[in-house]
Image: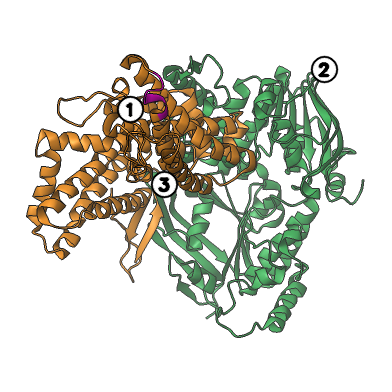
Chain colours: A orange, B green
């Protein structure tokens, strides 16, 4: 007979080990669809590794891909820690990108030291603004932020389309719905010559460290965690619950907005409506894989970016579909969720028909 | 063969990680016997009953239950359904009734065949009526449970167990929510049922009840059975010594002359969503150096009053003054600042953040203080020292100050809240059911601290359903019924009970 009983407290080893084990397990499980696709499994994994670590270029491509995921993962993490379910990072990312091109395409001129901070601030503010509405509706009327933020994504995307066909349209763009290019002085510089990797990564890493410090060391972070873990007790203890939620919402939106700035000003150079292949949504997966820890977000973003970049290379070399990447990421998430369940419980197996003798076969 | 024993718990042990919840507990229950199970919080009473009822799987040991013929047979462990089939009924402290269903539907819930074409209501009703007649447990069967009084709900719970032909009934702190009169009725009913052959395990903290009405008393301490005594041979001293391992200290009480008014409620009204959460023109003054006891059955407006004083609800009209200063803004922060310390009614829900550390929970009401933070950042070292100091001073025991607070036992969580409240030296202390669910040791600690605060010159408003506690601690007793206050005519239990029930006003 198998029984599942709650564990007193999951050990630190488990909380760190489970996401890593889940990620590895998900990678291994990818062998099943690979063999279905008729590919040589060993070779496929080799190609995948080559796509990530095979060259400096491959590695920087992976880091480039991880950059927006760190931002959106942080956005989800900070909001989720307050039990504020911001599903709207995708929309906030586009708002941030739009603000960056609005400010950074010639309207203002100046040295990079002025322009880059300006587009970063503009993008963060635009992202925060995108989250302000849902947060207000939640704290004032109790409107479910899952619904409002999710639906806003579509509204924002259509709004961006309208802007790209209208005021933000590049007059030199030969009719394509795209914005004017970001001026040179507002472009985030490349870290290595001839590589696409840009300083957006440095900003993302800095943001992760700041988020970690704020969450664990600041009074604001303590309030945020208190509100997320038990809003009733936080309220009773005199913490301004609504104010804390609002601040978490704005910062979450700002981080998502920065993802948009980083993509536009670091990578693309102009705004189109296919700027993000769902980074906002993937950020949620990143945050969950990271166990809602800001430093974990960095690792999780690197993992997911590796899977995507590696799967791309593999699909080109082996002729299998690159959708395999989505499969691995989804399986990793499922493994982490199951792993989180196992961490909270122990599974006890008692042989049937015997009086009592228990064997602890929990994951510990 | 008729065996007198109906239930035999044989050397049951249960560990949770490193914590021993029960160690080799052996208890027998006889037919028609009322056995009281006593013990401090965390002594293992609930774990033991959860194993009996199949919620937990014992690590070792066995349970035997008599079948309808009286033959003892081993109970399949870990299956609530097996326990139900064996005739074990349990009435939990927190009722498990569906409030939107009628009493009769609740009684039948779970014992009906899901796939039957039609419900045989008449037979069921006859059976319930028969049980009601035999036992004297009366409840309006067709009323929605949400509209029943607490006492009636409890009777529905017991009827539900009896309807399933329970021969063994476990009652977990059944009188916690009842008026003295209701409790007496319950005891009379149980007595009748026991004479009829029902065996009862009765979990309680109230020594007076246990002595008045059970046949035998078993005492648990630290997961072990430390004593078993026939009630006729026991007195309060003997039992409490068994429970806590020493005589319970009765707090010394000095006569103090009261000081200036600290809390004043002036024509305070709250229009709540229901009559139960409304207050009608409350006027009450609590002076420095006195403890005012607020008696009443739960759901008569005490919670609303506590919410107003905590800053969670704003009054519809009237006002609240602390030290002659009218409260302008009803928020927890502003009342905290005005000098109100609050011990919340539901300590798990409102008092602590279970997933955060003991140290953080100790500091959470004083986050603005420079002892806790500097420029918006936590002073971890101070936080730790503060927590170590308070853990020692208030004897907060658990896995440590960095551990999650939810791992603490109920008594230790309450000590944490006491430490937080009393260290802020509040002018007024609102203690809402501060000893509910606590063992004798922890409860006497709460009493001692409240008396210390009174000594220091604080005003204390003590809301409790335990009349014994109020009589022991309060200088004055006020009774709340239906959102109105009544001054207790004296310290006579019966008279207070009648006002609590709304019979006299």
Which circle, 3 or 1, is nearer the viewer? 1
CB of mark 1 within 8 Å of CB of mark 2? Answer: no
Q: Magenta stretch: residue B178 in it?
A: no
Q: CA distance from mark 3 to mark 2?
A: 50 Å
Q: Magenta stretch: residue A107 in it?
A: yes
* SS class, disc 3: strand
Residue A21 drawn at (x, y percent):
24, 47
Residue where numbered disc 3 is placed: B20
Chain letter of disc 1 in the image? A
Residue A347 drawn at (x, y percent):
34, 56
As rendered, which of B442 and A152 lies closer to the eye? A152
Q: Give, as a single range, the part of the protein colored magenta.
A: A102-108
Q: Which residue corresponds to the image point at 75% horizontal and 22% vertical from the top-left?
A: B254
Chain letter of disc 3 in the image? B
Residue B7 drawn at (x, y percent):
52, 67
Which circle, 1 or 2, is nearer the viewer? 1
Residue where numbered disc 1 is placed: A182
* SS class, disc 1: loop
Residue where numbered disc 2 is placed: B260
Residue B315 appears in which quarter of the rendering? Answer: top right
* Residue B403 in view in this figure: no
């Amino acid at each position: 007979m198998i029984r599942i009983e709650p564990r007193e407290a999951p050990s630190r080893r488990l909380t760190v080990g489970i996401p890593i084990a889940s990620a590895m397990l998900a990678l291994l499980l990818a062998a099943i669809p690979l063999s279905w696709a008729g590919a040589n499994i060993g070779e496929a994994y080799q190609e995948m590794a080559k796509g990530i670590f095979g060259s400096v270029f491959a590695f920087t491509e992976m880091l480039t891909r991880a950059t927006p995921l760190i931002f959106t993962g942080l956005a989800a993490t900070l909001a989720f820690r307050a039990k504020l379910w911001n599903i709207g990072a995708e929309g906030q990312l586009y708002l941030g990108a739009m603000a960056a091109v609005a400010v950074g395409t010639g309207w203002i001129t100046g040295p990079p030291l002025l322009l880059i901070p300006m587009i970063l601030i503009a993008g963060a503010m635009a992202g925060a603004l995108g989250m302000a509405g849902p947060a207000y509706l939640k704290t004032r009327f109790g409107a479910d932020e899952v619904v409002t933020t999710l639906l806003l994504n579509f509204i924002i995307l259509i709004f961006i389309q309208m802007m790209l066909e209208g005021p933000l349209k590049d007059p030199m763009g030969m009719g394509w719905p795209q914005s004017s290019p970001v001026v040179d002085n507002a472009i985030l510089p490349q870290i290595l010559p001839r590589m696409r990797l840009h300083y957006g990564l440095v900003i993302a890493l800095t943001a992760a460290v700041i988020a970690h410090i704020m969450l664990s060391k600041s009074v604001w972070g303590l309030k945020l965690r208190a509100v997320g873990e038990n809003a009733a007790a936080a309220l009773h203890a005199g913490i301004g619950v609504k104010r804390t939620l609002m601040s978490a919402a704005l910062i979450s939106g700002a981080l998502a907005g920065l993802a948009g700035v980083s993509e536009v000003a670091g990578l693309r150079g102009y705004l189109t409506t296919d700027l993000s292949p769902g980074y906002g949504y993937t950020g949620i997966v990143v945050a969950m894989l990271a166990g809602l820890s800001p430093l974990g977000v960095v690792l999780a973003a690197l993992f997911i970016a590796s899977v995507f970049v590696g799967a791309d290379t593999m699909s080109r070399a082996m002729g299998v579909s690159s959708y395999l990447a989505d499969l691995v990421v989804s399986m990793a998430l499922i493994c982490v969720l199951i792993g989180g369940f196992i961490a909270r419980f122990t599974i006890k197996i008692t042989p049937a028909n015997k009086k009592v003798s228990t064997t602890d076969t929990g994951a510990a | 063969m008729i065996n007198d024993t109906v239930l035999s718990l044989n050397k049951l042990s249960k560990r949770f990680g490193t914590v021993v919840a029960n160690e080799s507990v052996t208890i027998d229950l006889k037919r028609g016997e009322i056995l009281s199970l006593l013990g401090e919080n965390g002594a293992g009473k609930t774990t033991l009953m959860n194993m009996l009822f199949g919620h937990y799987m014992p690590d070792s040991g066995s349970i035997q239950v008599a079948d309808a013929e009286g033959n003892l047979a081993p109970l399949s462990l870990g299956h609530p359904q097996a326990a139900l089939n064996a005739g074990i009924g349990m009435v939990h402290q927190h009722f498990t009734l569906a409030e939107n269903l009628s009493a009769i539907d609740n009684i039948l819930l779970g014992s009906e065949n899901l796939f039957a074409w039609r419900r045989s209501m008449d037979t069921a009703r006859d059976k319930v009526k028969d049980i009601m007649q035999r036992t004297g447990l009366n409840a309006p069967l067709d009323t929605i449970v949400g509209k029943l009084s607490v006492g009636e709900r409890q009777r529905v719970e017991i009827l539900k167990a009896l309807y399933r032909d329970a021969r063994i009934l476990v009652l977990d702190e059944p009188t916690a929510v009842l008026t003295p009169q209701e409790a007496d009725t319950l005891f009379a009913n149980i007595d009748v049922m026991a004479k009829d052959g029902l065996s009862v395990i009765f979990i309680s903290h109230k020594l007076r009840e246990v002595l008045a009405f059970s046949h035998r008393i078993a005492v648990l301490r630290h997961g072990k059975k430390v004593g078993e005594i026939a009630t006729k041979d026991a007195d309060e001293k003997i039992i409490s010594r068994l429970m806590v391992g020493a005589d319970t200290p009765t707090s010394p009480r000095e006569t103090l002359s009261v000081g200036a008014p600290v809390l004043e409620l002036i024509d305070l009204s709250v229009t709540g969503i229901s009559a139960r959460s409304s207050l009608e023109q409350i006027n009450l003054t609590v002076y420095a150096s006195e403890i005012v006891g607020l008696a009443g059955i739960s759901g008569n407006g005490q919670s609303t009053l506590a919410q107003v004083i905590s800053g969670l609800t704003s009054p519809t009209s009237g006002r609240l003054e602390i030290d002659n200063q009218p409260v302008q803004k009803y928020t927890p922060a502003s009342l905290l600042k005005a000098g109100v310390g609050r011990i919340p009614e539901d300590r798990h829900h409102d008092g602590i953040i279970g997933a955060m550390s003991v140290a953080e929970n100790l500091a959470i009401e004083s986050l603005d203080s420079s002892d806790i933070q500097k420029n918006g950042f936590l002073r971890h070292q101070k936080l730790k020292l503060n927590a170590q100091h308070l853990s020692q001073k208030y004897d907060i025991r658990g896995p440590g100050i960095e551990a999650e607070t939810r791992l603490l036992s109920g008594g230790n969580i309450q000590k944490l809240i006491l430490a937080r409240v009393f260290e802020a030296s509040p002018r007024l202390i609102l203690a809402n059911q501060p000893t509910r669910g606590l063992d004798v040791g922890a409860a006497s600690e709460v009493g001692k601290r409240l008396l210390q605060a009174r000594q220091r010159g604080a005003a204390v408003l003590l809301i409790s359903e335990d009349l014994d506690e109020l009589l022991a601690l309060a200088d004055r007793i006020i009774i709340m019924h239906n959102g109105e206050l009544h001054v207790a005519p004296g310290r006579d239990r019966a008279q207070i009970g009648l006002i609590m029930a709304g019979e006299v006003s």
